[in-house]
Image: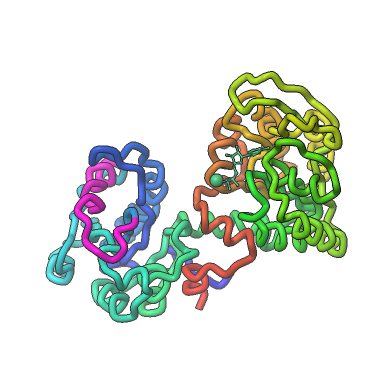
Amino acid sequence: MAWKALDDMDLKGKRVLVRVDINVPVEGGRVTDPTRIRRIVPTVNDIVKAGGTPILLAHFDRPKGKVVPGMSLEQVVPALSQELGRDVVFIDGDYGSRVSALGEGEVALLENLRFNPGEESNDKGFAERLASLGDVYVNDAFSAAHRAHASTEALAHLLPACAGRLMAEELGALEKALGNPERPVMAIVGGAKVSTKLDLLGNLVRKVNHLVIGGGMANTFLAAQGIDVGKSLAEHDMTDTAREILDKADEAGCEIILPHDVVVAREFKADAESEVVDAKKCPSDAMILDAGPESVERIGKAMSGCRTLIWNGPLGAFEIQPFDAATNAAAAIAAERTRSGELVSVAGGGDTVSALIKAGVAEDFTYISSAGGAFLEWMEGKTLPGVAALES
Ligand code: ADP
Ligand code: MG
């Protein structure tokens, strides 16, 4: 990988512009979940330890280039100070003079960058203004790296640039999972719809040895094979696309694993009456809400021959019991194999992260990415502008 790490930079006496993602949930002016803040602590504190002055650059919500007082980053300052264990100087308005007044070892946070239209338009002038505030640029916001914005892209070209600790950790995990993985590799792709994950499936069939398709999207693949899926969630206008993906997999020598048996119910509610049936025999008045136990066994068997697992999308409607069973069982197998050192397991995606936390395996996976859209685009094989800018 061609990017520099924090330890490659001389930070002593330098003002260090650090792009972070602290777009945390806030209710009534208070941060309700500081997870994202916690993850940038090592980078910020290591910059201070190395004698630098971190100046944090971040966005909050979607003010669309205008000043929206309710979207000020000032409301994040108390939680940020608490997690860092240091006071944070909040700087809004004209940054220049306030930034030059910062002393060594102080930590500053600039007001929501998206208050300025130049941020989202990747404006060179805005990036130059930001660059004039610092000597070094650190990007620690992998989750914002799929967007070419002034603070994630243009700015990286204007100063000596490197990846922060969190960014480096994330890139390292992704490289191990799909860039240069130990083979065989299994991918599990589930979730609601094929249409949102076409690029993902198209990229994975070329890169992995086994592709498990689950969740609502598996129904579309079953329908593509002429199977009646009853009242299941399925995109009947996507069956041609599903067939193309199957052909592509065939050409690439990628084994596709579709549900063999399924859990069906007439109602989509907690503890609804359900039964396990052959995937080819969904009753016409029922819907498929999860993969069945035989399918899980197959997945487990294929996984036992694999060295790497990459996972996006639950295998069933995991929010509601008992339709979380297949997701939980597959997660438990992956966790067990990861603990024993046989498997590298990397997962990401909003609902996937919730599902794996719910399954109680989040700690056992090699890496769980909280980067959402950026993780998906990376899995789709796309170049992330924020990462590419660090590499040049
Ligand atoms: P992620 O956010 O991890 O990328 P998705 O948003 O693609 O995942 O998919 C998650 C959603 O898919 C969940 O809300 C889950 O209930 C739904 N889902 C999974 N399987 C089914 C199914 N068989 N029928 C209906 N919905 C399903
Ligand atoms: Mg989702």
- Read off the magenta span: 62-82
75 horizontally vs 180: left or right: left
257 horizontally vs 144: left or right: right
Tell me if residue 151 comes above or below residue 321 in the rendering: below
77 horizontally vs 153: left or right: left
Q: Quadrant of residue 379?
A: bottom right
Which residue is pictured at 71% across the width and 33% down the height?
287
- Residue 75 is one of the magenta-drawn residues: yes
Which residue is pictured at 72% across the width and 44% down the height?
343
Q: Give the mark count.
A: 0
- Residue 293 is one of the magenta-drawn residues: no
Q: Quadrant of residue 356?
A: top right
Which residue is pictured at 27% across the width and 59% down the height?
112
Tell me if residue 147 comes above or below residue 27 in the rendering: below
Nearer the observer, 215 or 342: 215
Percent across and percent down for residue 342 are: 74, 42
123 horizontally vs 256: left or right: left
